[in-house]
Amino acid sequence: MQQKSWLTTDILSQLNANTCLLLVRSLWEYCPEHMFIVRVEGPGNFVIEAMNSTHETTSAETNAVIGKRIEQSLPAPLCHGVLANLGRCVESGAPVRYEENGDYLDRDGIYQHIHRQTLLVPITNTEGTVTHLFGISHDRAFSREHHMLTPGITGELERRVCERTAELIAANEKLAYLATHDHLTGTYNRRYLMELAEQELRRAIRYELPLCLLMLDIDHFKTLNDARGHLVGDEALRCVARTILATVRECDLVGRYGGDEFLILMPETTASGAQELAERLRNTLTQTSRLTLSIGIASRAPGDDVVIDLIDRADALLLQAKRNGRNRIECAA
Ligand SMILES: Nc1nc2c(ncn2[C@@H]2O[C@H](COP(=O)(O)OP(=O)(O)OP(=O)(O)O)[C@@H](O)[C@H]2O)c(=O)[nH]1
């Protein structure tokens, strides 16, 4: 039995072919509703053959789905219902109306709400087989920017915002750490140490407090590096850093000044206190490793305006310690 074509009405049959074509084209281009034609390839197997562009879908977006199976072009939560309705339309050979109303996560991980009504019309060939389905959808509530969120969705969104915020805070903390610390030893890097040291010096000047600066250098470090390799050299640097950090007070500032040189800034500490710490440091290191240190100690003097004044004096004393045989501490009288 020849089936009735649902796209043919009495009015249309009175129009000539050209007018029909013009009518279809105008509808396809200017109608604000979504229109699509799906090819029926077998039971449950539908391929999008054509789709119009509307104010909400660009031609690039519509072109991207043409030739794709329904499962490839629709969000998974909506797909099951749509496939069932397409199948129903093919089986019955009659128009089918259905409604989609739900939320789904888009490719950017953003919740979208969809509420649309669709009319499906079967298109048959001369043998009466449904070869295509024509669909027209009306969006009842679909906005990328504004939609009422159900409490469940709000909760999920809040959870995601909290998760992202926590990730950002962690990433920021990591960045701040990397910007202020030496990657190898975990002590402050030179730039940050200088910044903190200038603050300490200003405080010491303002309140007339003692302040000492220790500069230390590993003895014959180049020989160790050359003989045993850079990885062993790196471990030696870490070992010295660990020993310093375990020996100093919490308010002391420790940083890697460069190569195998470290600085320790000791607020509210006199030269004798600094010497005590330097001795302890040297002793601990000789007990736990084969490394020895040469140390120069400078204490704040009247006229010291910037930290480099102290660094210069500690550096000169460190050089003196090297010249005097290494593994020793030099401190200005
Ligand atoms: N493994 C390692 N070596 C480094 C690093 N930075 C600098 N160095 C090496 O540290 C060595 C510095 O040696 P110096 O302090 O100049 O000389 P030294 O052998 O310690 O001699 P003295 O200080 O006079 O006792 C050089 O061989 C540098 O290549 C680093 O991050 N890792």
Image (tube, rainbow, N blue to C red):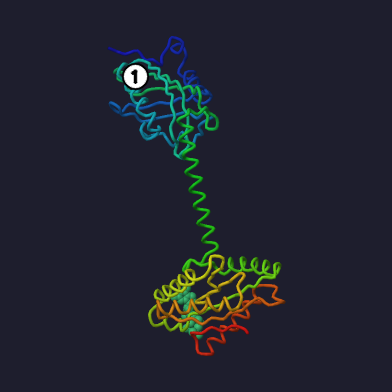
Asked if residue 95 is positioned above or below residue 302 in the image, the reply reads: above
**Foreground pick, 293 / 148:** 293
Front residue of 74 and 215: 215
Q: How many marks?
A: 1
Which is more toward the observer, 99 or 218? 218
- Horizontal arrangement in the rendering, residue 206 relative to residue 95 (left or right): right
Neighbor class of circle 1 (other Cα within 10 Å; few <14, some 14-19, many 20+) is many
Front residue (pair 20, 261): 261
Residue 323 % position (x, y): 54, 89
Q: Ligand 1 within 8 A of label 1's CB? A: no
Give coordinates of residue 68: x percent, y percent: 37, 34
In this rendering, the answer to whether 199 lies above or below 225 is above
In the image: residue 36, left or right of residue 177: left
Q: Picture coordinates of residue 205 (x, y %)?
A: 70, 70
Which amino acid lies under the numbered mark 1 shown in the image of this protein?
Cys
> Height in image: 157 above or below 214?
above
Give the position of the N terminus as an image quadrant: top left
Q: Which residue is mark 1?
A: 89
Tell which residue pokes out farthest to the bottom in this image: 324
Q: Quadrant of the C terminus?
A: bottom right
Instruction: Residue 122: give x, y in percent of width and height.
Output: 36, 19
At 42% from the left edge and 29% from the top edge, which residue is drawn? 50
Please tell me whether mark 1 sits on a helix, a strand or a loop.
Answer: helix
Q: Is residue 7 left or right of residue 312?
A: left
